[in-house]
Each structure stands twice: as C-alpha cells, then as structure tokens.
Image (cartoon, rainbow, N blue to C red):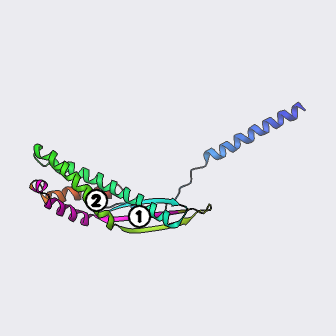
Amino acid sequence: MRRNVLRLSVTLALSLAFISILTATKPPKEVSVPCSDEGRSNAMYFRAAGMGKSSNQTGAQDKSLLLTKQTLASLIGSTLSSVSDNYSKSLDASKAQGFKQGFENVTREVVDQQLKFVSIICQKIEKNKDGTYQAYTSIEMPKEVLLEQFNSAISENKELKVDYDKAKFKEVFDAEMSKFEKDK
C-alpha cells in the first residue's frame, strides 16, 4: 500500500513538473488589434487608434471614437508642446515665456476645434460571445490643416503675432513631425 502511494506521489510530481515545463516554455501568443496599424502617425498626418466596449453597437462605436479623439488630442498637444519649446529657444528669453503661455492657449483652442473634423480611416466592430460589442477606430488629421489653423489663430492674436515667424515655426513643426517617420 505504501509503495502504491509512493508511486502515485512520484508519478503525480513528475506529471506536474512536466506540465509546468511545457507551459513555461510556450512563447506568448501575439494578438492582432484591428485598426492599430492605420492609427500610426507619420510626417503628413497625426493619427490615433482606440477601442471601446459596450452592450450595444452604437455605444461601443461612440466610446471608441471618444477615446481615439482623446488620444489624438494628447498626441497633438505633446507634439506641439515640443514645437513650442524648440521655437521659443529662437526667441529672446524675455519673450519666450510669454509666447509659450499664449501658444498653449491657442493650441487648446485649435485642437478642440479641429477634433470635430477628423477623418475616420478605419472602424471595425466585433460581437463577443457574451453579447457585448467591441469597436476599433483609427482617425487622422492632416498636419497641413492643423498648421493652417495655428497660423490663422496666431495671426489673430496681437501678442503672439509680434514674435511669430511663420517660416521658422513651420521648420520646427516639420522637424517634429519627421520624428514620427523615425519612430516606425
């Protein structure tokens, strides 16, 4: 009886060890996310991708679009913050701080305004086994449209207009946008 218990214990231990070896050496499975490739920015477009889940299809689409727009706004904001920092370095130190503060206000206004006009470049919807829906969305905003809106908004701002060199700003903006190509 003791031998049988001992054999059973050894067999069980070896089986568990073998199973743990098999599962430990299995590489993780790559997951493909719909619309994610289309949501990568480049030198010509700001792009973002997102996903929303809901019990109904429209809710999933709305959540996905909202989250994607928030991601795009964040991306544009951080990019323009870098542009503002780099552009401000070319200004006199006393003018740089004022320009940066004014520029941040213009950035918020322009981005909020332009998010209404983004293009949906990919949208896919899946129905899960539990009856919920998942929507995947990618959107884009052309850099030139955004740049035109900034030029217009800055030209209308008397304080910013004094220190604004359109050609220099475009040069700094293009340099920042080209970083998206390098990040691929």
Q: Identify the disc placed on residue 63.
A: none
In front: label 2 or label 1 = 2
Looking at the image, which residue is at 60% across and 63% down?
131
Q: Quadrant of residue 97?
A: top left
Q: Is residue 1 left or right of residue 56?
A: right
Q: Which residues are magenta?
A: 134-161
- For residue 180, say whether it is visible: yes
- Residue 143 part of the magenta-drawn span: yes
Q: Secondary structure at mark 2?
A: helix
Q: Residue 65 in the image: x percent, y percent?
A: 42, 63
Looking at the image, which residue is at 20% across and 61% down?
150
Is residue 101 shown above or below 43?
above
State the quadrant of the C terminus. Answer: bottom left
Q: Residue furthest right?
A: 1
- For residue 32, say whether it is visible: no
Q: Quadrant of residue 41?
A: bottom left
Label 2 CA crowd tier, 10 Å (few <14, some 14–19, many 20+): some
- Residue 14 part of the magenta-drawn span: no
Q: Residue 10 in the image: x percent, y percent?
A: 78, 36
Label 1, on which residue? 138
Tag 2 near tag 1, CB within 8 Å: no
Residue closer to the observer: 39 or 156 = 156
From the image, give the main secondary structure of the stretch colored magenta: helix
Label 2, on which residue? 111
Q: CA distance from mark 2 to mark 1?
A: 17 Å
Q: Which amino acid, by three-letter code, is at mark 2?
A: Val
Q: Which amino acid, by three-letter code, is at mark 1?
A: Ser
